[in-house]
Image: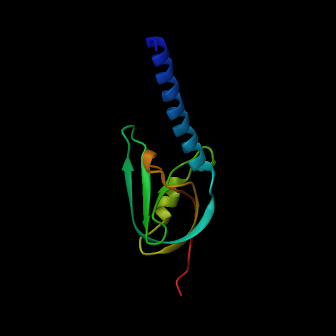
Amino acid sequence: MSDRTIGCLTVGCLGLVIGGIVVEGVASSTYNEHWRTCTVLSKDRGADHDGNSHYRIYTRDCGVLGDEDSLVRGKTNSADIYSQIQPGKTYRLRVVGFRLGLTSDFPNILAVQEVSSR
C-alpha cells in the first residue's frame, strides 16, 4: 500500500471514531427518558478545565446521576435542581440517557419531585 492509501485509511478510521462519539453523546442526551425513584446518599460539584460545573448525585437505588444543562432538552436549570436535592431524602427523578464510561456521561436529571415520607 502507498503512504497515501494508509493516510486515507487512518483519517477514515479516525473520522468513524469521532463520529461514533458524537452520535453516542447525542443519543445519551435524547433517548431513554424515564422516571426513577431514588434515595440520595450524597452529591458533589466539580468543574472542568473551562470552569463549567458538573453536578453528580449519588443514590442508593439508581447509581450515579448527572445534573447538567442540555440545549437539546431545553434544560437550563441544573443549578436549581441541584440545590433542591438533599442527601437522605427520596425523590422521583425524570432522567434521560445512559451511563457511558468511555465519555464519562451519566444519566441526566431533567425533573425532581420529593417523595413524602410516611
Which residue occupies the foreground of this view, 77 or 24?
Answer: 24
Relative to 26, is 101 on the left or the right? left
Depth order, front residue of 79/94: 94
* Nearest the eye: 107 or 75: 107
Q: Residue 36 at x, y = what percent?
A: 57, 68
Q: Residue at x 38, y 42 (%)?
A: 48
Which residue is drawn at the image coordinates 38% and 54% (left, top)? Answer: 45
Q: From the viewer's perspective, is residue 70 above or below residue 58?
A: above
In percent of width and height, residue 18 lies at 51, 33
Give the percent coordinates (x, y) of residue 17.
50, 34
The residue shown at (48%, 72%) is 61
Quarter of the image where one finds residue 55: bottom left
Residue in the foreground of this view, choosing between 40 and 84: 40
Is 24 placed above or below 84 here?
Answer: above
Instruction: Classify residue 87 as left or right of residue 15.
Output: left
Residue farthest front in this picture = 1
Residue at image coords 54%, 48%: 69
* Location of residue 108 in the rendering, given as x and y in whole percent from the top left corner: 53, 55
Quarter of the image holding residue 110? bottom right
